[in-house]
Amino acid sequence: MSTSFTAGPALPARLASLLGEDRQEITLGRSGALVWRFAGKEDSEALFLKADAVDPLSELPGEAERLRWLATTTVAGPRLRASFAESGYNWLLMTALPGTDLTHLVERPEQLRNVLATGLRALHALDPSSCPFDRRLDAKLASGAANLFAGRVDETDFDESRLGWTGHQVLDWLHAHRPAGEDLVVAHGDASLPNVMAQDDAFAGVVDCGRLGVADRWQDLAIACRSLIYNCGREHVAPFLDAYGAEWDEERYRYYCTLDELF
């Protein structure tokens, strides 16, 4: 049984209570999942709902597992309310974090840089041996190859420096230019500005955690720098890295931005 729900699949009956709440479809981001924000009533908190077609490569079931684990750490993330598959879709219901994502601070880049650096330092300070999610290069390259062979890679959306490449050329380049080692941390996996939250100019947590796991710290730093360049300008990269406590690494920046083309 399901209940009518506009702009997407039918809402499962177990989530029917959401129909009485104001909602907004969220289009920021490139995950491919359908996302809605429910404002919540006076006595209830705001919620986010994600839906994605059931597929072996869907990230939603893994995101639910990651939210459960993140809730045991000192880094804030959405709290899981429901996660299940029904009628051909994975459904993920979670709480909203306080504050706004960092795209709302682009007119104040100094505050933005500091929040981004603080958030990534906090996440990367977690003990990677406690994290059960393997996103090291062997696993990440295998996942990227699976996306490619399943037709999930959009070659028209590659960064300007790789426009005209095929997905197979990207994968071949990644194997040929793989870094010699990995500086492992608990990485977010997609540390762009929309996925880091701020409240009162302070770090408030991370969202969209479906790719979180143990990986090289430049998995996050590369995506964060790319997002910072796109939204604020290249001149903000050096002070961001200084606030984080790292130096520019051209090789790893290029590598992990290229790897991101497969996701």
Image (spheres, grey):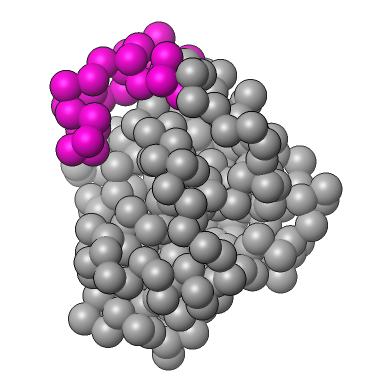
The residue closer to the viewer here, 134 or 88, is 134
User: From what the image shows, is residue 58 above or below residue 55?
Assistant: below
Which residue is at 40% across, 9% downward?
Answer: 149
The residue closer to the viewer here, 123 or 74, is 123
Q: In this view, does 122 lie to the left or right of 188?
A: right
Which residue is at 26% across, 64% downward?
Answer: 234
The furthest residue to the bottom:
200
Which residue is at 36% across, 62% downward?
Answer: 193
- Residue 250 screen position, x and y as percent: 42, 48
User: What is the tally of numbered marks visible in this picture?
Assistant: 0
| 16 drawn magenta | no
User: From what the image shows, is residue 72 above or below residue 236?
Assistant: above
The residue closer to the viewer here, 251 or 224, is 251
* Range of magenta residues: 146-174
| 165 drawn magenta | yes
The residue closer to the viewer here, 233 or 25, is 233
The furthest residue to the right:
129
- Residue 243 screen position, x and y as percent: 51, 77
The chief SS type of the magenta part is: helix
User: From what the image shows, is residue 179 above or below residue 127?
Assistant: above
- Residue 145 screen position, x and y as percent: 47, 16
Would residue 215 be seen by someone viewing this image from the given angle?
A: yes
Q: In this view, does 234 lie to the left or right of 17?
A: left
Specify the quadrant that holds the N terminus: top left
Would residue 92 be seen by someone viewing this image from the given angle?
A: no
Specify the quadrant that holds the C terminus: top left
Which residue is at 41% across, 76% downward?
Answer: 239
The image quarter in which residue 100 lies: bottom left
Q: In this view, does 137 lie to the left or right of 71?
A: left
- Residue 187 screen position, x and y as percent: 60, 51
